[in-house]
Structure formats: C-alpha cells, structure tokens
C-alpha cells in the first residue's frame, strides 16, 4: 500500500504500536491480534446500479456498484457470462492517491478481490447466457475507495460480495424478466500483516505502514482455499502461513455471518 | 490463461498415472539456466524451463529516478515482467497490462526481501524480465532467473530466491504444471522462498484447494526448490569457472 513521504511515522508512535503488540498482545486500538474492526454493510445504496453496497471497515470506507449489461462473451468461453473487477483509489480517500490510470496498488487489490469471487465460483456464470457465443450478461464490479484507513482488500471483497448477493440481472432491458444474480456461495477474504514477527488480522493504516509483509487468504463455506496473495517485501515462514489459513477460516466465518442474506 | 470452467474432456493422465509429457505428479520439467549472456547489462540470466524461454537483465544499483522515488534508507528493486508479442499462441498486444503489472509487483517485492537493499540508499535496482516464449509458470521461472541475474551482477544478497508452482489437475495435486495442464487446471499455487531459511517471499493461489491438498502441494514445492536452487548455483559457479579460465588459472 502507499509508501511515500507521508508514510513517515514518528518513532514514538511506531514504538508504541510495537510495544503494545509485543508486550501485551494487544493492538494500539485495543483489538486482539485476530480481531477485525467493526464492519458495517449497507446494501442497495445506489438504486441505479444492479446491486450495490457501502462498506465501512473501521475507518476505511468503500462503495461498490454492480452494473450488469448484455454483451458479447469472450470467444473462448461462449457459454459463460463475463465478470470484471475494477478498484478506483480516489484522490479524496488519501492525500497521496492521485487521479489517472490505475496504480499498481489498485490493480493488485482488484485482481485479488476478483480471484476470490471468480475462483470460488460465487457467480454461476453459466446461468448468464442469453444466446451462446452471441449474447451473455456482463457483470461489472466497480469499487470506489472513498476513505482509506488500511486493509482495502478485505473492505473491497466484503463490498463486492455484498453487492453481488443483492444484485438483479436487468433482463427486462432485452424483453425478458428480471432475475436475481445466481449466487452459489459467499467467499470471504481475510488479510493479515506481519509486524515484528507477530501476525495481525485486518490491519489499519498505521499497522500497514510498519508491517513487513501481507498475506490474504480467501476461502468459501466449503473450507477450501480459493485465492491467496502474499504482498509487500517481507516474508512469512511456512508455519505462519499455516496458522494464517486457520485464522482466515475462523475470521471468514465471522464475516459470512454479517453478509446480507 | 485458464479457460474458466472448461470441463476437462481431455485426458491429462495415462493409465499408469503419468502426465501427458510422461512426468509423474512430483516431477519437474527440465530446467537450464545460463548467466551473463548479455554484454550491456550489469548482470543477466537466461532460463529455459520446459517450453518457457525467459531473458532477464539487471541494471544497478544506480541512482533512483524520478528523484521523489528515492528512499534515503535503502534501495528499491523494480522488476518489470513483460511478455513478448510472439510469446503466446495468439499475439499479445505489446506493453504492460493488468496481469503483468501485478506480476511485476509481486516479483519486485520477493526480490526486495533477498537483496541487501540497506547498502544502497537512494538507489534503484532494475530487473527486466522478458518472456520470449511462455509455457506456464512464467512468473516463477522469471523470478528464479532474476535471482541468478542479480547474483551475477554482484548485487549483495542475503540468499537467492527460488520458486516453483504446484497445482491441481483432474483432482490430483501435481508439481510444475505444463501449459496444457494449466489450461485445464483446477488450482494454481506459485511459491518462492529464500532456500537457506525457507522464508516465503512470494505466494499466490487461485482455484480450489482443500487444506490437505495445500499441504501436499507446498511440500512438493519445497522439495523441488532444493533441486532448482542447485541448478541456480551450478549456473553461477559455471560462470565463475569460465571467468577463471579466461584469466589463465
């Protein structure tokens, strides 16, 4: 995530966060190591979209809108709908976010979110065919990041899954009957960072800034791994990764409890 | 590219459980690494891994540019993974795309962990990875060759970085997927480690793996990295042996 002059944190603050985690096993904001921040999900926020959700994760806030349009399938998958995911790091969200073409960070976030949804087969793309090879439904997931305080991957996954779960395919635009987007499962991504050999769940911005490495593990109800991504220049030991998978399974179930039904 | 949800009507194992190219599930494809194959670059490596042919060049450490990218405490490693237009079956439109930008990012981060960046404040180290022919597993092959190219450039490193991919084909966990297996694969797990410590510096996954399958896949990968690391070392040693010969020793 952004590392630049504004990331410079006072030594005092850095030491405070480190010490608290090391000595008391408690984080600067009082959370336990494996505790998510408060999640608030509001769906159907954008009625003009086919599905939408506003998600706040602590003080991180993202808006996801789903647009579903009829269009041509990819030539190699004539019997499937199309899914695309895009994340915009808006300049309003953070002092160093800039307008313009997508940054590496926004591309990585979008691709990790996309993989979790795609690989879990959350959307039954085979049910999104109007006429094979000619016309299918294209599902655009667009996520605006409007307030940034860490862990955009999980905030964006929660927003996308929530918005998709409530989305309606506007089939009336081509003379058919609208129908709910066919959903098979609800994946949950859980992102952890490593601070001084201690792994914490759902980092806020300050924790991200002093973390050496990041790991995202996305699982679905079946308890299988669907997507993973290690990020940032640090490393994880294999034991840490195995523990992170267990944590993801537990925390993921908590997230699923608050997804819209 | 994975063909999403394509049913594998194609047989990917024979009656003896061997794969299309005759490998058993834990076998690697042939790997060959050659160092210092380019003149201008500070260090370079060429890797052939199965049908992958990838050229890597290292420039630096050199002054970081643009200036505002300079870090007063350390150098940064900037890898650029690029696929040649002719590297895949259907011509690839030249230039960076979202996939290559993501791969460049995770490779940069993996290398940053191994390079002793603290020795070179305000510097950047460029690693150019050109995939000339792609045959599945390009990011790991590119990263494995990058570590060799950095070492050949004399960049101080804590350790090499060595990677391998495992995946799931027809419900079976296999090492180092071929292009055909990748097209019909159910999961893909590229991992890179620093071999001396086993520290994981790159890990991505997509598809579907149970926890047991994940553990099977990673243990296959860890075992394979020992062999690949030996190939890296041999390539470097061979290069220095040649240098010594040139000097009449």
Image (cartoon, coloured by chain):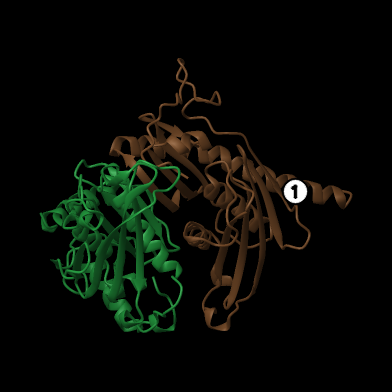
Chain colours: A green, B brown
Indicate the secondary structure of the residue bearing disc 1.
Answer: helix
Q: Specify few, some or many for label 1: CA neighbours under 10 Å numbering under 14, 14-19, or 20 or more.
A: some
Question: Is A223 on the left-hand or right-hand side of A208?
Answer: left
Question: Residue tagged by mark 1?
Answer: B239
* Subunit of label 1: B
Where is residue B208? Give x, y as percent: 32, 40
Question: Is A125 on the left-hand or right-hand side of B181?
Answer: left
Q: Is residue B39 above or below residue B224?
A: below
Where is residue A116? Give x, y as percent: 31, 52
Residue beneath the point at 61% across and 62% down: B127
- Pick the residue in front: B244 or B74: B74
Q: Is residue B18 above or below residue A163?
A: above
Question: Is B66 on the left-hand or right-hand side of A210?
Answer: right
Residue A120 shows up from this direction:
no
- Pick the residue in front: B37 or A158: A158
Where is residue A188? Give x, y as percent: 23, 53
Question: Is A255 on the left-hand or right-hand side of B210?
Answer: left
């Amino acid at each position: 995530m952004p590392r630049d002059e504004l990331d410079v944190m006072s030594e005092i603050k850095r030491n405070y966060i480190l010490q608290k985690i090391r000595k008391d096993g408690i984080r600067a904001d009082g959370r336990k190591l494996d505790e998510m921040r408060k999640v608030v999900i509001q769906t159907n926020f954008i009625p003009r979209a086919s599905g939408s959700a506003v998600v706040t994760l602590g003080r991180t806030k993202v808006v996801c809108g789903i647009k579903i349009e009829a269009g041509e399938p990819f030539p190699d998958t004539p019997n499937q709908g199309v899914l695309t995911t895009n994340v915009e790091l808006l300049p309003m969200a953070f002092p160093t976010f800039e307008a313009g073409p997508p940054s590496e960070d926004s591309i990585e976030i979008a691709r990790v979110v996309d993989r979790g949804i795609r690989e879990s087969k959350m959307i039954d793309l085979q049910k999104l065919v109007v006429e094979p090879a000619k016309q299918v439904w294209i599902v655009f997931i667009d996520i605006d990041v409007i307030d940034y305080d860490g862990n955009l991957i999980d905030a964006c996954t929660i927003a996308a899954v929530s918005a998709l779960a409530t989305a309606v395919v506007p089939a009336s635009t081509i003379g058919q009957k609208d129908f709910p987007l066919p959903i098979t499962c609800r994946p949950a991504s859980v992102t952890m960072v490593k601070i001084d050999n201690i792994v914490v769940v759902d980092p806020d911005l300050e924790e991200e800034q002093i973390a050496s490495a990041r790991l995202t593990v996305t699982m679905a109800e079946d308890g299988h791994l669907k997507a993973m991504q290690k990020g940032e220049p640090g490393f994880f030991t294999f034991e840490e990764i195995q523990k992170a998978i267990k944590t993801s399974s537990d925390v993921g179930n908590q997230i699923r409890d608050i997804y819209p039904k | 590219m994975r063909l999403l949800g394509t049913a594998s009507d194609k047989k990917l194992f024979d009656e003896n459980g061997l794969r299309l190219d005759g490998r058993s599930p834990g076998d690697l494809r042939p790997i060959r690494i050659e160092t210092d194959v380019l003149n201008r670059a500070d260090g370079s490596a060429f890797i052939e891994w199965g049908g992958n042919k990838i050229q890597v060049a290292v420039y630096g450490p050199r002054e970081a540019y643009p200036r505002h990218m300079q870090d007063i405490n350390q150098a940064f490693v900037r890898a650029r993974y690029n696929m040649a237009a002719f590297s895949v079956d259907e011509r690839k439109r030249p230039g960076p795309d979202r996939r290559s930008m993501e791969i460049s990012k995770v490779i940069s981060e993996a290398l940053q962990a191994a390079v002793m960046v603290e020795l070179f404040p305000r510097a950047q180290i460029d690693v150019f990875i050109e995939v000339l022919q792609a045959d599945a597993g390009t990011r790991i092959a590119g990263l494995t060759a990058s570590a060799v190219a950095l070492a050949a450039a004399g960049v101080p490193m804590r350790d090499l970085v060595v990677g391998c991919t495992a995946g799931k084909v027809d419900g079976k966990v296999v090492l180092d997927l071929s292009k055909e297996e990748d097209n019909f694969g159910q999961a893909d797990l590229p991992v890179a480690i620093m071999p001396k410590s086993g520290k994981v510096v790159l890990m991505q996954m997509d598809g579907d793996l149970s926890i047991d399958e994940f553990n099977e896949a990673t243990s296959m990968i860890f075992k394979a990295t020992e062999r690949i690391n030996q190939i890296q070392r041999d390539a470097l040693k061979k290069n220095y042996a040649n240098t010594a010969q040139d000097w009449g020793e």
